[in-house]
Amino acid sequence: MYSRRCSNGRAPVGIRWYSEHDGVAVSTTTLVGPRVRPRPQAYTARPAAVPSVLHIDGGTEWGGGQNQVRLLVREFETMGLRQLCICPEGSPLEDRLRLEGLPVLGVPWRGGADPRTMIAIARKLGEFHFTHCHDGDALHVALIPTMAVGSPIVATRRATQRVSSVKWNRARRVIAISDSVRNGLLAVGVRGEKIRLVCSGVDAQEVRSLAPAQPKLRDRLGISANSFVAGNIGSLIGYKNQALIVQAATYAADITWVVIGEGVERRAIENAIAARGVAGRVVLAGELPDARRCLLEINAFVSVAAGEGLATSVLDAMAAGVPVFAADSGGAAEVLRPVHDETGAVLFRPGDARELAQMMQRLREEPALRERIVVAQNRRIEDFRIEKTAMATLDVYREVLR
């Protein structure tokens, strides 16, 4: 395992890339070689230069995890890997992969150990060296068919919530997307020798080239062009903690807070907005198509979750050149630590709504601070390019099949 150093010469806190190619410029064509069709016993044999992989993702909605699968499949396609992604029939991931001409198979999937899903997986296992399960649902449904034929599993864990160590220890390797996720896995008994740290990635060029949202966010929500907007993107669920934004609004009357996303906590957040009398300052925008298109309309991005695995919306906002602020906890803090070390301005104490509000007011009053933060972010985002995520994941694949 190697430490990745930032351009300022310091190793970023908590982020270590598992990549034997770190810092080396190589041609992906040279690296992975020609396409190779696996032998029937491929999952027990030493792989050729290009391992073939069956991806499985159980998400029925679009989120950061599904976008990571899309980006990874796309990168592997450019490298020449033979691959297929199995996901729920009619899911946003299936639609997006088909739209981009990437290999995908939508299957009936009610959740849990759906026998139809297991049969679909079993029919495809012999065509690939191994299976990559991209979430807990995928791992759950893949265990029986893969164990039946002895096919190895790589499983990715993206969240810090407690899981069953029995299930995750069945995987040959477990990819943790941050140190916070890794520590959570170790705490429940997942064996350390199985865990490899491979951080999520972002295609910064893709984010920067996105067309603006239509209609524009501010027009849609009736927000004036000169309003200072602090934005958040994420599902409205407990651990995302958007209720903290409502609290922060009580300390900053001159800031408009916009939350993009839907979820089970919406009613509770609406009640909190009404109770604190901040209806004119906190706007719940609901779910919007490709919310990344709204990033250039906000003045700051805030991640208020405490202990989240690694919010990919943080990476998207950084790539878009928007100053990002986060609770000093979990994967978001790991990403932003070098930026905070340089500026002293982007991490706040978890749960401290007053400090968050003060940070927004300071950013509004000090235009030079925005420039300092964005410059530091631009250096940091280089450590999270999707190409590096793909290369590090490929290293894990080769280790499994060595």
Image (spheres, rainbow, N blue to C red):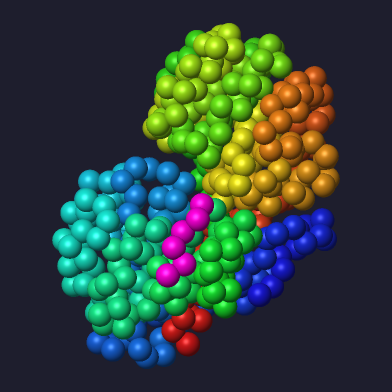
Q: Would you identify the image quadrant in which residue 297 lies? A: top right
Which secondary structure class fits the magenta region best?
Answer: loop
Residue 231 among those drawn in magenta: no
Classify residue 4 as left or right of residue 230: right
Task: Say whether residue 35 is visible.
Answer: no
Q: Is residue 210 above or below residue 142?
A: above
**Horizontal relation, residue 175 to residue 143: left or right:** right
**From the viewer's perspective, is 301 left or right of 69?**
right
- Determine the residue positioned at 40% across, 50% down: 66
Whether residue 332 is visible, yes or no, is yes
What is the x, y in percent for residue 177? 56, 59
Q: How many marks?
A: 0
Q: Residue at x 32, y 80 (%)?
A: 151
Say which of 215 and 348 sits in front: 348
The magenta segment: 161-166
Image quarter of residue 356: top right
- Establish if 99 lies above or below 222: below
Could you say which is closer to the camera, residue 253 or residue 276?
276
The N terminus appears in which quarter of the rendering?
bottom right
Give the residue displayed 34% in from the left and 42% down from the top: 61
Relative height, residue 352 to residue 86 (above, below): above
Q: Is residue 162 magenta?
A: yes
Q: Quadrant of residue 140?
A: bottom left
Between 243 and 259, the one lying in front of the other is 243
Image location (x, y in percent) of residue 176: 54, 63
